[in-house]
Image (cartoon, rainbow, N blue to C red):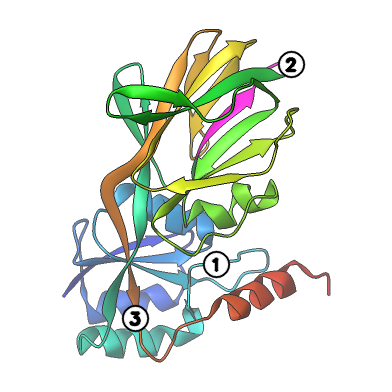
Amino acid sequence: MKITIMSSREYPEIKKLRESFQVSAKGDICIAIGGDGTFVNAARNFDGPILPIRSGERGSIGYYSDLCLDDIDFVIDRLKRRKFRIEKLENKIEVLYKGKAHTAVNEALLHNIDVEVSFKIYELEKGKRYEVYPYVMSGDGALVTGVIGSTAYNKSAGGPIILSPHVVCLTFLNVDGPYKNPIVIDATKELEIEISKYSGILRCDGTEIGRLKKGDSFRVRLSKKELNIVRFKDRYEKLADKLERVIVSRMVK
């Protein structure tokens, strides 16, 4: 088995991986060692299945990692014996802007520049678009996310933690309007967001895609690119275990 290694640091445990497997830029799986940022970077740049491993450093949450660096011998043994399964976590998010497609793992984000940004939301179906709300939303902006991004910026913004890969969530950022709660739609749907007033920045996973003014719009949908993760049957964290670990990691000792 060939592996690809992506790591936030050159941890001592990486030496064991290099001694046990052939390391390649195009491995059968990618081992991402670090926190959620490392995992997202791996997901953005590697098309195959990913095995996330927590580095264990304070402040490094590793939400999608069932394992930490202390488990490296276990990991090596199971990979060599191919005692693992590949789980589809979700599809990546695709943003269509000015005729070009951009891929995000965490979220597509529209954010105001100087003052608030006003926008309308449409659902696209069979070449036609329909208003999601019959009014303009105004505020700091909005983000669109799926399973993975639901525990990142989305969670900090008050959005829900998503457990199903078959939905897309739109979370508003400090907006005014009769209805301001996040909305969840079927993953087969496509959204279009159009600027009604002022201007905003469009970002994919923090990378600026463009600056939008009144009349500009972009579309968001789930990409056909899947994000798969390596799981071990007897080392699987449930949601409550993950949330407890996240909370403890944020506590001041």
Which region shows up in magenta?
A: 108-115
Quadrant that contains the C terminus? bottom right
Mark 2 lies on a secondary structure that is loop
Q: In the picture, residue 170 is in which quadrant? A: top right
Q: CA distance from mark 1 to mark 3?
A: 24 Å
Residue at screen point 50% across, 85% down: 70
Is tag 2's residue or tag 3's residue first in the polypeptide sequence? 3
Q: What's under tag 3, amino acid-wise? A: Lys
Given the current orientation, which residue lies at the most extreme left position? 1
Image height of 72 relative to 144, above or below: below
Mark 1 lies on a secondary structure that is loop
Q: Is residue 189 left or right of residue 237?
A: left
Q: Which mark is residue 115?
A: 2
Dominant SS in magenta:
strand
Image height of 189 relative to 48, above or below: above
Task: Tell us which disc is closer to us: 2 or 3.
Answer: 2
Q: CA distance from mark 2 to mark 3?
A: 52 Å
Q: In the picture, residue 52 is in which quadrant? A: bottom left
Q: Is residue 106 visible in this depiction of the protein?
A: no
Task: Find residue 248 and report its horizontal and vertical position in percent.
Answer: 73, 75
Q: Is residue 227 left or right of residue 118?
A: left
Residue carrying label 3: 16
Q: Is residue 77 left or right of residue 38?
A: left
Quadrant that contains the N terminus? bottom left
Task: Find residue 167 and report its horizontal and vertical position in percent.
Answer: 43, 52
Residue carrying label 1: 63
Q: Nearer the viewer, residue 59 or 22?
A: 59
